[in-house]
C-alpha cells in the first residue's frame, strides 16, 4: 500500500474545497472557518506531510504536492503559508486537478541562491532546536513570534498543534521548508485557473509578495487584503475571511 495523507471530510453538498494548513498546524486548525464553509461546500481537510495524522509521512514539496493531489482530487484548493506552497506546486504540476486556487500568506519561494541556502540552513537549525526543547516549548516559542501577534488563544489552536510530533515537524522543516523550495516565480504565468491571493493588511512583507504574485500570474489573479489582520489573516479575522471566500467563489466560475 502506498503512502497517503490523512484527511477529514466535512459537509455533504456543494462545491468541493480542499483546505491545506500551515507549518505546526493540522486539519483541526481551520476552526471556525470549516464550520462556516461546510454549510454549503464539501470540505476535504488535509494533514500535510509531517503533520497531524500524516506525521509519519516524509516528503519534500514536490512529492508532498503529489500526495495532496492524490487525496484532494479535482477541487478548489485553499492553502495557508506552507499549505499554500504545496497547493501552488500542485496547481503548476497538475493543473487539471485545481479548479480554483486561494493562497493565504504564501510565497513562490526565495529567488536569490545565497538567501535560499541561508534559509535552508536556518530551517535545519530550527529542526535541531525543536528536537532539543520538545514540542510544547517549541510551539510556545513559535506562537510568540511577532508574525503571530494577532492570534488570540482560540485562533492559535495550540491544543490542536500538540497533536503533531517532533519527528514529523522536524522532517517538514528539513524536507519542505522554504529554503528547500525551488523558486516558482518564473512559472506563475502558467497558472490559468482563477487565483485569489489573500494577505493580511498588516503583513507588509507578504503584501509586497502578493502584489508581485498577482502581477506575475496575470489577469486571472486577484489580490485581496483583510483589514486588521497579519500573516494568519484567515484565523485573525475568520468572519471576514469566510465572507471574502464566499463572495469570490460565487462570482468566479470554474472555467476548465
Image: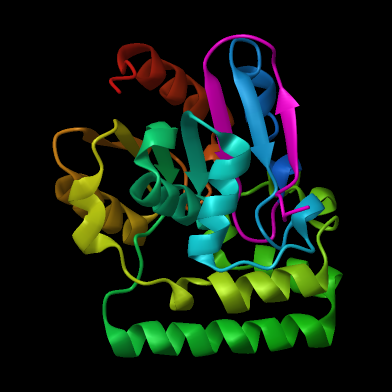
From this view, report whether residue 216 is shown above or below residue 244.
Answer: below
From this view, report whether residue 187 is shown above or below residue 47.
Answer: below
Toward the viewer: 18 or 128? 18
- As for residue 87 lying within the magenta part, the answer is no
Q: Position of residue 82 (x, y in %)?
A: 53, 58
Q: Position of residue 252 (x, y in %)?
A: 31, 18
Q: Report the residue at 62% width, 89% height from top.
A: 125
Q: Quadrant of residue 97?
A: top left
User: Relative to 129, is 113 on the left or the right?
Assistant: left
Q: Which residues are magenta?
A: 1-25
User: Relative to 134, is 95 on the left or the right?
Assistant: left
How many numbered marks are there? 0
Toward the viewer: 140 or 70? 70
Q: Report the residue at 61% width, 74% height from top.
A: 173
Q: Position of residue 175 (x, y in %)?
A: 58, 75
Q: Position of residue 253 (x, y in %)?
A: 32, 15
Residue that sits furthest to the front in the current view: 1
Which color scheme is applied?
rainbow
- As for residue 7 lying within the magenta part, the answer is yes
Amino acid at each position: 500500500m502506498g503512502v497517503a495523507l490523512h484527511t477529514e471530510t466535512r459537509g455533504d453538498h456543494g462545491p468541493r474545497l480542499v483546505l491545506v494548513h500551515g507549518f505546526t498546524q493540522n486539519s483541526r486548525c481551520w476552526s471556525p472557518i470549516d464550520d462556516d464553509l461546510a454549510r454549503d461546500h464539501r470540505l476535504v481537510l488535509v494533514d500535510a506531510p509531517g503533520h497531524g495524522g500524516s506525521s509519519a509521512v516524509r516528503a519534500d514539496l514536490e512529492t508532498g504536492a503529489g500526495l495532496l493531489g492524490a487525496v484532494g482530487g479535482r477541487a478548489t484548493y485553499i492553502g495557508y503559508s506552507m499549505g499554500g506552497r504545496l497547493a501552488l506546486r500542485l496547481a503548476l504540476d497538475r493543473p487539471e486537478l485545481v479548479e480554483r486556487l486561494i493562497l493565504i500568506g504564501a510565497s513562490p519561494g526565495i529567488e536569490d541562491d545565497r538567501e535560499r541556502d541561508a534559509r535552508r540552513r536556518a530551517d535545519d537549525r530550527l529542526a535541531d532546536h525543536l528536537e532539543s526543547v520538545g514540542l510544547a516549548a517549541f510551539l510556545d516559542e513559535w506562537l510568540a513570534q511577532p508574525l503571530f501577534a494577532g492570534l488570540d488563544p482560540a485562533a492559535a489552536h495550540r491544543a490542536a498543534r500538540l497533536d503533531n510530533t517532533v519527528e514529523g515537524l522536524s522532517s517538514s522543516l528539513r524536507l519542505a521548508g522554504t529554503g528547500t523550495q525551488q523558486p516558482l516565480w518564473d512559472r506563475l504565468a502558467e497558472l490559468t485557473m482563477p487565483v485569489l491571493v489573500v494577505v493580511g493588511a498588516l503583513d507588509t512583507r507578504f503584501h509586497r509578495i502578493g502584489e508581485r504574485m498577482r502581477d506575475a500570474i496575470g489577469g486571472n489573479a486577484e489580490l485581496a487584503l483583510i483589514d486588521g489582520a497579519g500573516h494568519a489573516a484567515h484565523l485573525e479575522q475568520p468572519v471576514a475571511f469566510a465572507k471574502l471566500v464566499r463572495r469570490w467563489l460565487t462570482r468566479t466560475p470554474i472555467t476548465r
